[in-house]
Amino acid sequence: MIYRDTLKTKNSKRLESIKAAHQSGRTSYSTRMEDYLEVISELVELKGYATTLDISRYMNVSAPSVTKMLQRLEENKLLEYEKYHGINLTEKGMQIAYEIRQNHGILLEFFEILGVGRETANKDTEGMEHHLNPKTIKQLRKFITFLKSNPKILENFKNP
């Protein structure tokens, strides 16, 4: 009976934790919307512009799906989109894309320090980059900086 009560308490705490995480309201934008902003930002940086076809290819979705999402992003004032004329991120859209790209880079660097292979690190990062609190990212950045400025600690971790 004590075991079951302990289990219920643990499960209850876990449920409360999940509930709190979902109520945090970090952003009203979906992960998918953020992915689009990130891809558009990368394409603009790489090519100077982004097209519906480019986005469709990179995200492995149909062109009509891209068009629908672009309309949603425009409704949310994250980009300006005119069919056959081009896609421009608004200041707000650029800020979100920048934050996601920063998160991605920090997480990748952290996973590389841990010795996780690049392919696995990329896959893991892709899901996490959208959900971390800015304070968590800040602490990860500080921790990475600490490790890099203390090569003996890093060496001991990598070669026990």
Image (cartoon, helix red, strand yellow):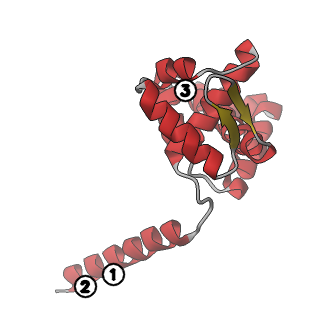
Q: Position of residue 133 (x, y in %)?
A: 65, 57
Cα distance, mark 3 to mark 2? 39 Å
Q: Nearer the viewer, residue 18 or 36?
A: 36
Quarter of image, res 94: top right
Badge number at residue 115: 3
**Which amino acid, mark 2?**
Asp
Cα distance, mark 1 to mark 3? 35 Å
Of helix, strand and loop, which one carries label 2?
Answer: helix
Question: Can I make out residue 7 in this image?
Answer: yes
Quarter of image, res 158: top right
- In the rendered image, the vertical position of residue 89 relative to residue 12, given as above or below: above
Label 2–label 1 contact, CB within 8 A: yes
Cα distance, mark 2 to mark 1? 6 Å
- In the rendered image, the vertical position of residue 32 relative to residue 156, given as above or below: below
Badge number at residue 9: 1
Q: Residue at x 56, y 23 (%)?
A: 52
Q: Nearer the viewer, residue 38 or 83?
A: 83
